[in-house]
Amino acid sequence: MTDAGLDRVASVSGVLRWLVLAAIVFLVGLAAALILRPSLMAGAAESVLPGAAAGPGGVQHLLLVPLVLAGLGVPVAALWHLFRLFGCFHDRRILDREPARHLRMFGVLLILLALVRFLLPTLAVLVLTWANPPGERMLMIRLPGAVVEVAFFGALALVLGWAHGAAAEMADENRQFV
């Protein structure tokens, strides 16, 4: 790659790194707000299942906390690996094992995110309707198209990470011969 190409990769990666960090801070703040402000959790519950809001401080709120942490923790972990990947590229470490590892982990976490996004609404509806009398409890299973797209994008990132790792190994071997 030419110096101009490396400079472009480094500069764009530097900007993207800070944007990803801003997204991480936003998601962590959102998780804290949802957990610490039961009224926000009730609003989020209303969006999942209209008419079934978790009461402030209630058992439903406590049961929804792990779901919120899972729902926001997985994307934060994925974004953290993306942040680290852009950091490697910003430092001009393109054909190295570390960016390949971050790309693979990003892919794995995107696949996990797709699974979480599929399961969480179902679990949230179970939590929100558990206190209802028998016959009024609900089970909702849905597969939004975005879940499938995220899973395929995660698989693509995983395969690209494997290919990047193989290229990094070849680059290491070539450096040892020279």
Image (cartoon, rainbow, N blue to C red):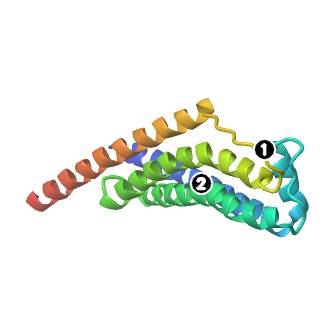
User: Number of numbered discs present?
Assistant: 2
Instruction: Report how far apart the C-alphas of labels 2 and 1 lie in the structure.
Output: 19 Å
Which residue does the numbered mark 1 point to in the structure image? 48
Which residue does the numbered mark 2 point to in the structure image? 75
Image-based side of 100 in relation to 136, left or right: left
Q: Residue at x 23, y 49 (%)?
A: 166
What element does badge 2 sit on?
helix
Please identify, in this view, whether the residue under mark 2 or under mark 1 is nearer the observer: 1
Q: Nearer the viewer, residue 56 or 75?
A: 56
What element does badge 1 sit on?
helix
Specify the quadrant that holds the C terminus: bottom left
Q: Residue at x 76, y 60 (%)?
A: 30
Q: Nearer the viewer, residue 172 or 80?
A: 80
- Indicate the amino acid at tag 2: Pro
Does 23 sit above or below residue 28?
above
Q: Residue at x 86, y 41 (%)?
A: 50
Disc 1: CA contacts within 10 A as few (<14), some (14-19) or many (>=20): some
Q: Nearer the viewer, residue 9 or 49?
A: 49
Q: Quadrant of residue 100?
A: bottom left
- Indicate the amino acid at tag 1: Val
